[in-house]
Structures are given as structure tokens and as C-alpha cells.
Amino acid sequence: MADFDLSIDEKRVYADKSEKTTVYVAANMGVVTVDVSDDLVGGFRIDHRCDPRDIAGSPGEIAVATAEDVLLVRDDYHELDFGPAVAVGFHQNRIVAADESGRVARFAEDGWTDLGTVEDVRALDGSLVAAADGVYRIVGDELSHVGLDDVRDVSDPAGRLGSDTGVPLVATDSALYALGNGWMETLDSETSVVESMPDGRADAVTPGGIVTLDGETWKENPIPVAEAVVSLAHDARTTYAVTDVGTLCLQTTGSEWRTQVLGLDATGIAVR
């Protein structure tokens, strides 16, 4: 169901909701914000014009990797003097970023601390770095190679939030892996995107579409449009997905997918 077609009653329910979420989408014209209440999609707008390459969320904050700098979003957009970036994430609630040369650094109040250099960084989340030659882990102020190959995406909810709950997941061109007694294959399929939460919820993107973790089994959970999902995000109740041509999809616990066409090519999605 496209949310352009919301009934008058649904719009009234949306207007009466006090709990609203702002979803941030990295699109070709900049950062787009979308108002969401429960599983209803409200208005959307270009919130900040830039050239975003990646976007990530942490409680109360959004980080954006752009062609010019890394931006921290709280009540406004703040440049962090990193320089052009290709990937961004959060490690123990602090921003980490990577540039085209492979430099990986972490931001704190006194500025950026370089952690190391990795060729062809593809994604950052928590203590993990996805790269062409495998997974790297942030250990103190350094990077350590910890296995695998041709990694497309990583999800490390414990490392992201500085907690002790949540299983690290790694998406590769051959399979999806979970960290247990070493890296253990949890899904025998090429995966391009993975996102997980401390409460055990997890979703990934395979050539056939989105799969959702149900207990110990990955089950197909396709969105209602024939488009490629490029990014996933979660909050306390909802899973968010965005496609390459800018369709926002959301699914609250126990509900069907809702969609909203944004009309902009997209590369990432995040909530805070």
C-alpha cells in the first residue's frame, strides 16, 4: 500500500499521534527527513543539501559521510573536519569514519584519532570494519584483521552502543556470518546489507530480497515493490528499508510493509 493513498481516518490517526520518529535518508540531493508515526508515513523534505555517501544513527545522533566532510546531526548539521568520507558509523556511541584512502578514525571531543588504514572500506558499525579483504576490528586505538573475505556490510549492536548484548553479523558475497566460536555461517546466500539490534532482531538483504531472523531461522520478508534494497535500520519497534530508487519501506512488529515513494536515488537510511 502506498501512503499517498492514506484514508482520512488514517491521516487523523497520524495527526493524533504524539510519538513521532524522524527517519533520515541519504539521497542524491542530500539528506531527506521523513516523519513517521507508528506505521504511518507523514511528510518528507530535503533537510540538508550535500553529497552523502553513507549515513548512520545512534541514540540522539545521526552521522553523515559526504563528499566534503563528516556531519554530526543533532539539532543542526555540524561539520567535524574529517574531510571527504566514504563510510560512517558509531563505535561506543562515538562516530567512526573512513575516507577513500582507507584511513579509519574515531571522533571525540578533542578531535579525530586515527585507528589505521584499510584498503577499500565498505561499511563501519560498532567495532567492525567491512573491507574487500575481510573484517577488521577496533581494538583500543588500532585495527586488527579478524578473518573472512570480500565483506559487504557489518552489524555490531554491542560495539555500536557500548553494551554487552547483540551478536555481530557480517554480510559477504558468499554467505552471512555470525560471531560465535569464530565466524559461523548463519545463512548460505550472498548478502549485501545486514542490520541487527541488541534485542536479537536482525534483517539482511539477499539477491531475493529481505530476510528476517525468526528465532534461529532466516525467513523471506519481501517488500511490496520490485526494487533493490540498499540500506536497513531499526528502532525499538520498526524495521526501515530504502531502495536504490528512493522508496521508503517500514514494518512495525506484526504488521505488513508500508511504502512511501520519495522520488530520489538513495544510498542509506538511519534513525536515532
Image (cartoon, rainbow, N blue to C red):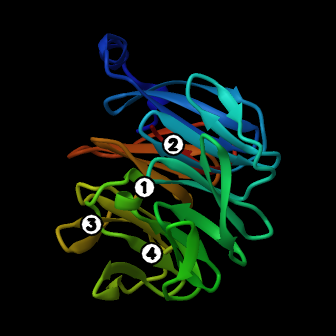
Query: Which residue appears at 37% of the width and 16% of the height?
Result: 11
Q: CA distance from mark 3 to mark 2?
A: 21 Å
Q: Which mark is residue 170?
A: 4
Other residues around mark 1 within 10 Å, as few (<14) / some (14–19) / many (≥20): many
| Residue 229: image location, x then y, percent | 53, 58
Q: CA distance from mark 2 to mark 1?
A: 24 Å
Q: Where is residue 96, by image quadrant?
A: bottom right
Q: Nearer the viewer, mark 2 or mark 1?
A: 1
Q: Is residue 121 above or below residue 247?
A: below
Q: CA distance from mark 3 to mark 4?
A: 14 Å
Q: Which mark is residue 213?
A: 3
Q: CA distance from mark 2 to mark 4?
A: 24 Å
Nearer-N-terminus badge (2/4): 4
Across the whole image, how many numbered discs are drawn on residues? 4
Q: Nearer the viewer, residue 10 or 129?
A: 129
Q: Return the residue at label 1.
A: 160
- Check disc 2 and report its element: helix, strand or loop: strand
Q: Nearer the viewer, residue 203 or 132?
A: 132
Q: CA distance from mark 1 to mark 4?
A: 14 Å
Other residues around mark 4 within 10 Å, as few (<14) / some (14–19) / many (≥20): many
- Check disc 1 and report its element: helix, strand or loop: helix
Q: Return the residue at label 2.
A: 248
Nearer-N-terminus badge (3/4): 4
